[in-house]
Image (tube, coloured by chain):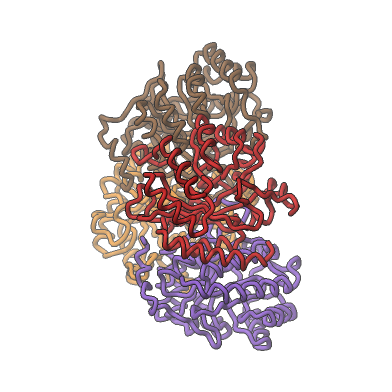
Chain colours: A purple, B red, C orange, D brown
Amino acid sequence: MTVATLSRGVDVRARKVIESGALSFGGGELVVIAGPCAVEDEETLLEVALGVRAAGARALRGGAYKPRSSPHSFQGLGRPGLKMLKDVAAAAGLAVVTEVLDTRDVEIVSEVADILQIGSRNMQNTALLKEAGRAQRPVLLKRGMSSTIEEWLLAAEYVRASGNEQVILCERGIRTFETATRNTLDLSAVSLLKELGDLPVIVDPSHATGLKELVPPMSRAAVAAGADGLLIEVHPRPEQALCDGQQSLTLSEFRLLMAQVTQLAAYTRQFSY
Amino acid sequence: MTVATLSRGVDVRARKVIESGALSFGGGELVVIAGPCAVEDEETLLEVALGVRAAGARALRGGAYKPRSSPHSFQGLGRPGLKMLKDVAAAAGLAVVTEVLDTRDVEIVSEVADILQIGSRNMQNTALLKEAGRAQRPVLLKRGMSSTIEEWLLAAEYVRASGNEQVILCERGIRTFETATRNTLDLSAVSLLKELGDLPVIVDPSHATGLKELVPPMSRAAVAAGADGLLIEVHPRPEQALCDGQQSLTLSEFRLLMAQVTQLAAYTRQFSY
Amino acid sequence: MTVATLSRGVDVRARKVIESGALSFGGGELVVIAGPCAVEDEETLLEVALGVRAAGARALRGGAYKPRSSPHSFQGLGRPGLKMLKDVAAAAGLAVVTEVLDTRDVEIVSEVADILQIGSRNMQNTALLKEAGRAQRPVLLKRGMSSTIEEWLLAAEYVRASGNEQVILCERGIRTFETATRNTLDLSAVSLLKELGDLPVIVDPSHATGLKELVPPMSRAAVAAGADGLLIEVHPRPEQALCDGQQSLTLSEFRLLMAQVTQLAAYTRQFSY
Amino acid sequence: MTVATLSRGVDVRARKVIESGALSFGGGELVVIAGPCAVEDEETLLEVALGVRAAGARALRGGAYKPRSSPHSFQGLGRPGLKMLKDVAAAAGLAVVTEVLDTRDVEIVSEVADILQIGSRNMQNTALLKEAGRAQRPVLLKRGMSSTIEEWLLAAEYVRASGNEQVILCERGIRTFETATRNTLDLSAVSLLKELGDLPVIVDPSHATGLKELVPPMSRAAVAAGADGLLIEVHPRPEQALCDGQQSLTLSEFRLLMAQVTQLAAYTRQFSY
């Protein structure tokens, strides 16, 4: 192996299990986080939350601050969105995973989020990584669009070196020349990190592929590759979503997916990684 | 979907099942092709062939003509290698899959090969594709290192337009910036092609990852993504292999892999694609 | 052209000339910004500043805050580094270009910097882009490692939409599979942006290639492609530099480079773009 | 430098000058090869040939055998196209550069071509490289779409190891995520090869960019980077071309280009590489 930093985790006993309330990443359970791309309105959010909870999801995702490529695209509801997330998740009995974009917002987002998400565009925003390292929340760190595995682990190291060892890695596809899918999901990275690293790894097939038809097979493949969890975009009416409707599952599609991956995770647990 | 050529296969009833003797690709069976990178000597080849046959492989792979990056690397045994392949495969009861590099060799390689392999470096060698289109053998067409799915299907179209509809696609990883793995295995491509194309798709996790430790988890992920078969490098003593030893499984590792993927394929057959 | 946002600049009369004190980007002059990767100590910085000023550079670059891949690498001197930059640049009669990494630092860095740099890793740090859009300083926006031209222009749009139209684009190489150079310098992007956009474009051949031997020919090529300026790493003793010594020119190499590019810029001004 | 094979050429005295009739690559002259993408009809070809000759081109390019992505695209005229090339080039006083796709055609193409072109899609077609190594013609070897500089030199090594030292390298852009240009022209590769290799290097800005507007600035940049020649697509009526019209210059645009690059080449000769 050429990734020097991977040496940190060779000892299986050193593998970290990251806990957030009743959730546990890296301990054998498949944790599914689901929800819409962005928080839009309370009614829709509650509909999603109750639906994904009933299907077996453990946490609610949803952006209050959205890092869009264009400043003219919907940027998220901001603080009112955070409040909605908190209220809805509490009502549904779900943990909250939401993204923070600005060092000045880490504190306020931490009041709502059980898990702080740092997105792909900010994977090498070292100021934000350091600030998240001072938060008392697990950090879900998405891989940068063109980050090597080594750079990804070094980004995690920024959080860890600032005092927060609770990092969950999230593979969400890398940028390649292929245009049929939004990104290229790199499941080898998941297996490599499970084999040699010490952090839990989850997979986001929605952003990776950009196509709802590929979310179920790539979720199954992620589970077979050893992923500790999944991050899935769900919207009750994808055609009306304010962002990323093309890659969102409906609630009934999500229920079917959950049945498959739950079974498959139980089945594949017999294989050592 | 933006890949126009994929429209050909939307109708499930049009999906092709490709048969070669007793082998059947795309009909629900998981076909495993195994063997060394290159044909080296008859004794070693027979040891591999008997071993992989006993473990459940259905075809023997092995290069008599090797397309190496450097002219100073081992180029394969050529015709004597072809003869060895034929004799050994017959003795072990396996079909033969071997690569052809030159339009002038298609005929002679077809006498030995049950399935003609066209490698990544020649995926857009249009003269070779056309010549393979005139052969009476199924063609295993590996994806080019930086080929889009659309270009890959168009390469298959060269074979088909020349009269040979028996094409099996083989995903073997694409070239990206990531250096921890030899290539980046693109399993989304497999699912996309299974969802929308009409040709069988198999996966080569050995060349894709370049690391034997990743071959088992990526084989499992490929099966979960819907692959119709696997192409696995196996060598009784990888450290002595003339090429690609780092990615070859031993016979005992291969047996373990076969047990896992056979079970998993039976299990995942319940999920529709 | 497929880049919709480029339509903004089709009218030649709309091309922006960005001025910072006596400096003028996009008005026909070739502006060279030079200096060390990081501010290390005042004596060295002054030696560089006087040397590059004598050779014809107009601005001093140097990082007080460094966005390194690893948290264990030198992170810059911070505020003391800013003060050094200010004092030394004033003494040498140079403008200051320096990077800002955190929204909370925009104000303090603006007190020292004549031009605020936003680096590749933060090209899609939308919070920082917005904050820079509220500063009263031109922003030098480096292209992200794997950003398309369109995404780069959209990042510039974040600054512009927040009220600051003074954006200078800086091409610094993109990430590809090639490993012989640190990145792949994309000079087509420079010509495309000069042809169709309205913002000045400069080139950083030092970070793009990572090899000092390639800095002179790539600087000449950048000028021939129509670049409005260059960003060059210079260190009096590259082998002692705290970062990126391999790509830094010595002062005497820089003098030679300046003689070449100044001549060439005058010569190529006759060609229309 | 990490490219081991580049060590071959460190000694400046060992740099090869490759001659073909009156043409000389690598000896200080800028050699421009121009013509249409494909040979279409004799009248058009003659019009182009006389036009580019008058403007200063030294060789005529044009495909008789075309390696198109789709088998349903125009594949070239074949042997009749070769004859047209020969007749027209003789009439215009130009050398012929044309592509060979099949090992079986090397002999017949060599009868017409002064320089044999091996295209990007066949850069690792080792059978073809070896056969070209037995021809008595210089070989113009285009870089593969995703080939590293090292692999490109190793492909050249296949030709050289088979007995033909007359190889001219041609940079034509590599495949990246950027979609605004057809490929990403890698001029750093040109400088690196001129700095450390022993073979002449020319540049094809037409295929690299896919946009005629970028052909002039990228031609100038290539000259400034040290290129020994240019390969330019020219068609009298690009909108009627059977392939690649979008990137073809008209004859009058080509004349303007020639005036610029001839001047610039004379000017930049003063800079050492």
Question: Left or right of A205: which side holds C86?
Answer: left
User: Could you tell me if residue A24 is visible in this image?
Assistant: yes
* Residue A81 placement: quadrant: bottom right
Q: Is residue D38 above or below residue A67?
A: above
Task: From the viewer's side, name the closer residue of D240 and B37.
Answer: B37
- Residue at the spot x=68%, y=67% of the render? A248
Q: How many marks?
A: 0
Task: From the viewer's side, name the closer residue of A45 and C211.
Answer: A45
Q: Residue furthest top?
A: D91
Query: Where's residue A121, x and y in %?
Result: 53, 65
- Residue at the spot x=55%, y=34% of the render? B128
- Residue at the spot x=65%, y=63% of the render? A72
- Residue at the spot x=25%, y=60% of the render? C44
Q: Is residue D68 above or below residue D237?
A: below
Quadrant in the picture for the N terminus of chain C = top right
Query: Where's residue B182, x and y in %?
Result: 43, 54
Task: From the viewer's side, name the closer residue of D30 and D63.
Answer: D63
User: Could you tell me if residue C58 is visible in this image?
Assistant: no
Q: Residue furthest front?
A: B91
Question: Left or right of B38: which side holds C252?
Answer: left
Quadrant in the picture for the C terminus of chain C = top right
Query: Where's residue B107, x and y in %?
Result: 54, 32
Question: Left or right of C20: which side holds D249?
Answer: right
Task: From the viewer's side, name the closer residue of C22 and D262.
Answer: D262
* Residue D222 placement: quadrant: top left
Query: Where's residue B36, x and y in %?
Result: 42, 50
Q: Is residue B172 above or below residue B102?
A: below
